[in-house]
Image: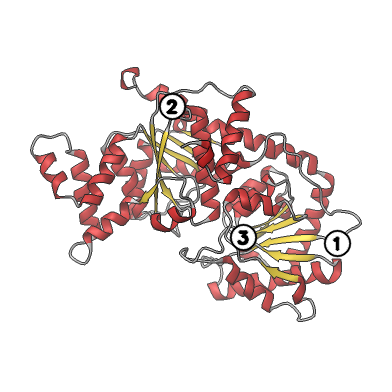
Amino acid sequence: METARLSAPDLHLTRAFEARTRTGGPPLNRRISKILITNAVALNGGDAAILQSTIAILRERFGEGVRFEVYDMAAAASGRYYPQINIKQDIYSHVRDWAGARIRPAAAALFLLAAAWLRHVPLIGKTMHGLLPPGLRRTLADYDEADIVVSSGGTYLVPHYSLAGKLLDFLVTEALGKPLVLFTQSLGPFPPVRERVLLRHALRKAMLILVRDERSRRHLAELGVASDRVRICADAAFALAPAGLRGRSFPPAHRPWNIAISVRDWPHFKDSASDTGMERYFASVARLAADLIGQHGAMVTFISTCQGAPEYWTDDARTADEIVKRLPSAIRPHALVDRHFRRPVEMIARLKEFDLTIATRMHAAILSLCAGTPVLPISYEFKTTELFRRFGLGDAVIEIEHIDPGRVLDAFDKACVFWTEHSGDAWAIVREHRKSAFEAGDLVQHMLDRDLPQATY
């Protein structure tokens, strides 16, 4: 794709690639020509940040000539928002469509796996391949042509999400003999259910698993995955931070505060019913917003990475509306709900306008850090707690499971102290995370060199 045709986010990533190469990044390696990125969810702004960063990281390592094809759960909609990326429908959706009402998806998946394993067996392989619907035949050929299959980074190998589609992707990759890389993940714990056996098998066969935190590495060790195939790396989205980032401290002096708040729906409370847990969450965030506006004269804007895309299953602006309803009517005009869809680099540009982001979405927090804007995190999964513990902000992390107005106000006070006294150290850690994110490409190259004979190139 010619640079002149790239969108603004891709121009940003291309320039970041060029700048890092000029300043002595690792030498480019052109032995890889096609990379598949699977399990993408580009309608989610955080996952889109991971996706665009993954492409930039791997393109920097393997060269501008590498062709990327992305498999997404909602390919048609995602392709409209990101037309510069070649996005295709994920393999599990094809299987479910093929199964229809006639057969179970599991039976269709088993047939597909058999066709993949037997593809080179005379007559049988050709016959089975011919029985697949055209979409699955094209998808199988796509996987077979890839040099690497990269399962997108994120948080989807956790107990409260279905593993079926991910397992099928991993098993098809294995059946075709392709190297499987899981990009920076937070995963586990893995419950003792029937899927655990297949997941253990698939993850043991992976060439490389990149995790974002020590807790995920322990979960893999408990599953029996060899430690030499697991590495800790920063979340890929930190690649969007500019080199030499110098962020701000908080609070600013001598002017009203401009505060961003990212919220989300969370149906997975452990110690209470979802309705009860969400009501505590609404009340707590509303109390903090009311305090910021009433006591500090702040302007509050609810803005998030999952909004403005009607095709996606959730819109954080609706959650924000529930919180604004709970604000006293006198201060409600000082709380705005931003409903615009923004691509990752556009979101970074918007977050630069704020003095602080109170972030429930983890990638709203990461993109805020990439913008140089301080963060107060609300943690709904251990990934956020683990991330901000490395920043030294652990005492200020608000656990959604135990949220209440008192804890939120206390956490805000602690965050003010942290960003006043330790902001320089925090921004140095962001720069280290950027470096770590780009080093993921080096780790992929290292494992390829270790696992694949030279004759395959």
Mark 1 closeness class: few <14, some 14–19, many ≥20 residues within 10 Å: some
Mark 2 closeness class: few <14, some 14–19, many ≥20 residues within 10 Å: some
Does residue 214 show up? no
The quadrant in which residue 253 appears is bottom right
Choose the circle earlier in sequence order: 3 or 2.
Answer: 3
- Above or below — where is 200 with respect to 79? above
- Above or below — where is 286 with respect to 426? below
Q: Residue at the spot x=43%, y=32% of the render?
A: 66
Residue 89 in the image: x percent, y percent?
Answer: 35, 52
- Furthest toward the left, the residue is 123
- Above or below — where is 157 with respect to 446? below
Q: Which of marks 1 and 2 is in front?
A: 1
Rendering colour mode: secondary structure
Name the one closer to the observer, 432 or 89: 89
Measured Cα–Cα span from mark 1 to mark 2: 51 Å
Does residue 219 show up? yes
- Furthest toward the bottom, the residue is 329
SS class, disc 3: loop
Measured Cα–Cα span from mark 3 to mark 1: 22 Å
| Residue identified by numbered label 2 | 447
Residue 45 in the image: x percent, y percent?
Answer: 55, 54
What's the residue type where badge 2 is placed?
A: Met
Choose the circle earlier in sequence order: 1 or 2.
Answer: 1
The quadrant in which residue 438 appears is top right
Measured Cα–Cα span from mark 3 to mark 2: 36 Å
| Residue identified by numbered label 3 | 304
Choose the circle earlier in sequence order: 3 or 1.
Answer: 1
Mark 3 closeness class: few <14, some 14–19, many ≥20 residues within 10 Å: many
- Above or below — where is 89 with respect to 4? below
What's the residue type where badge 3 is placed?
A: Ser
